[in-house]
Image (cartoon, rainbow, N blue to C red):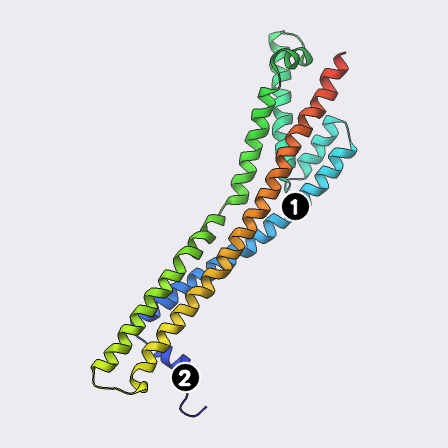
């Protein structure tokens, strides 16, 4: 269009401050999409692995067989909890045998399942740490980039008023500065919006998986009770 603004030329001829602002926003956006892709793949893999392990868990009653499946299914956060609980179960059994203080059924009947609950909680925390890794970075990008873009906007407006102060009173004198300002705003929002949306989405996914893990901890204790304490009777 004749007399139209060439946005790429304006950006190329913009000041060093605006260029640095745009570079920072582009880096932030690239980092955001990298994290989004990684977390999307990770949480999808975790959900599918949890579903497979839960189906196996519900279809089997053998503690040892379930542990073999859990050992092979490393992607599942639930299988991680199972391995932690199973390891603690074996440790308690070995300690009782070495000390000659009765069998494991008597131990849990007298002292409860606190040691197993702590082991399951440890697995829960380890799984959460992996799932939440770098998710908070999305929140930081979503919170900071609009203000970085706003800084570029303010600087572009300052350039526009500088054009007026230099004696140019036409729209051509202020258009480049205004264009810089609008582009900085747009890029800031383009970096922030996906980061905030996916931050909330991933948090919801993690909450859902946490709910599954909390339910599984009760199912694990029920399995131990059926397999050990009931057999005692």
Residue 109, percent from left and from top? 66, 13
Identify whether 192 is placed above or below 89.
Answer: below
Q: Depth check: give the residue in front, 149 or 48.
A: 149
Residue 47, numbered circle = 1
Residue 13, percent from left and from top? 33, 79
Residue 155, numbered circle = none
Crowding at mark 1 (Cα within 10 Å: few <14, some 14-19, many 20+) = some
Q: Depth check: give the residue in front, 220 or 42.
A: 220
- What's the residue at 59%, 25% (across, down)? 117
200 sits left or right of 50 in the view: left
Residue 103, percent from left and from top? 68, 11
Q: Is residue 42 visible?
A: yes
- What's the residue at 44%, 64% (across, down)? 189
Do labels 2 and 1 touch, CB within 8 Å? no
- What's the residue at 32%, 86% (across, down)? 172
Q: Which quadrant of the figure has residue 102?
A: top right
Query: Which quadrant: the C terminus?
Result: top right
Q: Earlier in the sequence, mark 2 or mark 1?
A: 2
131 sits left or right of 163 in the view: right
Q: Secondary structure at mark 2?
A: loop
Crowding at mark 2 (Cα within 10 Å: few <14, some 14-19, many 20+) = few
Residue 91, percent from left and from top? 61, 20
Q: Secondary structure at mark 1?
A: helix
Residue 6, numbered circle = 2
- What's the residue at 39%, 57% (across, down)? 144
Q: Is residue 26 visible?
A: no
Q: How many marks?
A: 2
């Amino acid at each position: 269009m004749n007399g139209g603004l060439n946005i790429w030329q304006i950006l190329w001829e913009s000041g060093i401050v605006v260029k640095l602002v745009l570079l920072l926003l582009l880096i932030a956006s690239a980092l955001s999409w990298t994290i989004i892709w990684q977390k999307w793949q990770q949480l999808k893999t975790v959900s599918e692995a949890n579903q497979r392990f839960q189906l196996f868990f519900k279809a089997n009653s053998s503690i040892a067989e379930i542990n073999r499946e859990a050992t092979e299914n490393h992607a599942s956060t639930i299988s991680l909890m199972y391995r932690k609980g199973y390891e603690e179960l074996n440790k308690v059994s070995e300690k009782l045998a070495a000390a000659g203080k009765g069998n494991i059924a008597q131990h849990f009947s007298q002292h409860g399942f606190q040691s197993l609950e702590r082991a399951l909680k440890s697995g829960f925390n380890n799984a959460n740490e992996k799932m939440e890794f770098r998710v908070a970075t999305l929140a930081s990008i979503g919170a900071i980039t609009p203000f970085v873009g706003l800084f570029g906007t303010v600087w572009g407006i300052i350039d526009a008023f500088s054009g007026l102060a230099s004696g140019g009173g036409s729209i051509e004198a202020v258009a480049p500065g205004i264009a810089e300002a609008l582009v900085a705003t747009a890029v800031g929002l383009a970096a922030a919006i996906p980061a905030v949306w996916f931050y909330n989405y991933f948090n919801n996914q993690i909450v859902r998986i946490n709910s599954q893990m909390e339910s599984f901890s009760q199912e694990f204790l029920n399995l131990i009770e059926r397999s050990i304490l009931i057999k005692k009777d």
